[in-house]
Amino acid sequence: MTAIHAPTYDEHWGEIMPSHAAFVEALLARTRDAGTVLDAACGTGKYWPLVLASGRTVVGVDQSPGMLAVAAAKHPEVPVGRVGLQELAFDAAFDAVMCVDALENVGPEDWLVVVAGLARAARPGAPIYLTVEQADEAALAASFEAARRAGHPVLPREDFDGVGYHHFPVAGQVRAWLAEAGLEILDERRGDEYLHLLLRRPG
């Protein structure tokens, strides 16, 4: 699906919403000067100008070659790599980590694996910024029932749009996964149809 959207992603979804911008700035305020930020599931590098303008550097990883190609064309100075969220293998390598507008593509069976990988990538004490897309509950229930009737293997709180699956965990379950991954919540707010979480890897 990301390969389909890559050429026109910025045209349709390139605007940075105010709540997202505020949390990126909060992440950067807790990141050491000249530090390096990991943008996991970076897409087209939408948030990189905010990071680079702060004087920090950024490394982008994504599972989509198309998205990475667009990002690299815009910012050839930024190192990129083809790595899926479930495949993160960094060990205390970054001064901050962010995963924005992406976790809705992760099924419940992989959530803890992904969050643990993001936590492991951060140096002890480093900040982490995650977003969790929020769904209209009635629409989500109707979509789930329609997909189930059509024979698609959907799970509760999962939406199938005919191309891909999107999972919308409740906030309590998200907090439980974060706690199991050893992450401390510094700030949690809703805005622009997302739950925004500023976290810290203790240490």
Image: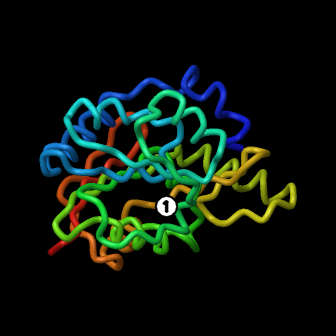
- Which quadrant is home to the C terminus? bottom left
Residue at figure coordinates x 77%, y 46% from the top left: 163
Residue at figure coordinates x 26%, y 41% from the top left: 23
Q: Is residue 8 above or below residue 63?
A: above
User: On the picture, is 116 further left or further right than 33?
Assistant: right
The amino acid marked with disc number 1 is: Pro
- Name the outermost residue toward the front: 77
Location of residue 83 in the rendering, given as x and y in whole percent from the top left corner: 56, 59
Location of residue 87 in the rendering, given as x and y in whole percent from the top left corner: 54, 68
User: On the picture, is 33 further left or further right than 92?
Assistant: left
Residue at figure coordinates x 66%, y 52% from the top left: 159
Residue situated in front as seen by the camera: 3 or 148: 3
Q: Toward which corner of the image does residue 152 lie, by quadrant?
A: bottom right
Query: Which residue in the structure is indicated by mark 1?
Result: 169
Residue at figure coordinates x 45%, y 53% from the top left: 40
Residue situated in front as seen by the camera: 75 or 199: 75
Location of residue 132 in the rendering, given as x and y in whole percent from the top left corner: 43, 51
